């Protein structure tokens, strides 16, 4: 882990907070090219009724538009949560150089936890990756959100019962 990785991961956490403000699960992602952010994304699945609207996909789309190419060699993708199957697949398609993620995802993580997709032999592109950058902060951001949401649901149920 280096200082640059921490800096960009903090920025990704700010994007995750934007998702949270919109009632979405707080995951944020960004794409860095030559030291500059060229794509930002945060979860929008609920609001846009779109299962593919994950933070990483949104960031890759914006980066592709910025560069004018869906291929993003020499780019680094930062995301606060371990990517799922779809997003790990999109990273291979987009040819990014490196992935850096924060918290592990025991349920749908497809890089280290449930699957090790990026390590699959025979892939046409290798994405290097680094896990655990600001992992605790990223995990806390998520768990605080779910805790708050459970409390809100409980309060709503209680109110409905009265
Ligand atoms: Zn995903």
Image (spheres, helix red, strand yellow):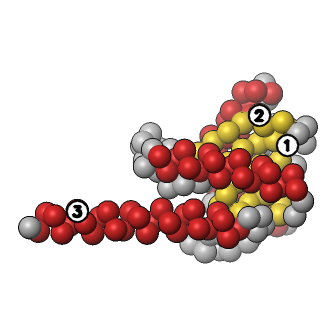
Q: Is residue 86 visible?
A: yes
- Residue found 87% across the figure and 64% down from its top: 1
Question: Which quarter of the frame holds ligand 1?
Answer: bottom right
- For the residues marked 2 and 1, what is the alpha-carbon distance in whole angstroms? 9 Å
Badge 2 marks a residue whose secondary structure is strand
Badge 3 marks a residue whose secondary structure is helix
Pick the front one: 32 or 2: 2
Dot 2, how many residues are within 10 Å of its Cα: few (below 14), some (14-19), or many (20+)? Answer: some
Q: Quadrant of residue 81?
A: bottom right
Residues marked 2 and 3 touching at CB (< 8 Å): no
Identify the residue under disc 3.
156
Q: Which mark is residue 48?
A: none
- For the residues marked 2 and 3, what is the alpha-carbon distance in whole angstroms? 41 Å
Mark 1 against mark 3, which lies toward the viewer?
A: 3
Identify the residue under disc 1.
75
Mark 2 against mark 3, which lies toward the viewer?
A: 3
Q: Is residue 122 visible?
A: no
Residues marked 1 and 3 touching at CB (< 8 Å): no
Q: Is residue 162 left or right of residue 118?
A: left
Task: Give coordinates of residue 24: x percent, y percent.
Answer: 47, 50
Dot 3, how many residues are within 10 Å of its Cα: few (below 14), some (14-19), or many (20+)? Answer: few
Pick the front one: 39 or 150: 150
Pick the front one: 9 or 112: 9
Disc 2 or 1, which lies upstream in sequence? Answer: 2
Q: Is residue 151 left or right of residue 95?
A: left
Identify the residue under disc 2.
38
Badge 1 marks a residue whose secondary structure is strand
Residues marked 2 and 1 touching at CB (< 8 Å): yes
Outermost residue to the left: 162
Disc 2 or 3, which lies upstream in sequence? Answer: 2
């Amino acid at each position: 882990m280096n200082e640059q990785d921490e800096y960009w991961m903090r920025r990704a956490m700010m994007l995750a907070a934007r998702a949270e403000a919109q009632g979405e699960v707080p995951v944020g992602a960004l794409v860095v090219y030559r030291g500059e952010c060229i794509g930002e994304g945060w979860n929008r699945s609920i609001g846009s009724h779109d299962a593919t609207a994950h933070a990483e996909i949104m960031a890759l789309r914006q980066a592709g538009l910025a560069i004018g190419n869906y291929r993003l060699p020499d780019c680094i993708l930062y995301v606060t949560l371990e990517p799922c199957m779809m997003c790990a697949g999109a990273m291979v398609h987009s040819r990014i150089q490196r992935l850096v993620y924060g918290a592990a995802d025991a349920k749908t993580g497809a890089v280290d936890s449930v699957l090790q997709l990026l390590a699959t032999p025979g892939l046409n592109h290798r994405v290097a990756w680094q896990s655990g950058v600001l992992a605790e902060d990223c995990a806390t951001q998520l768990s605080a959100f779910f805790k708050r949401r459970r409390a809100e649901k409980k309060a709503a149920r209680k109110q409905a019962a009265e």
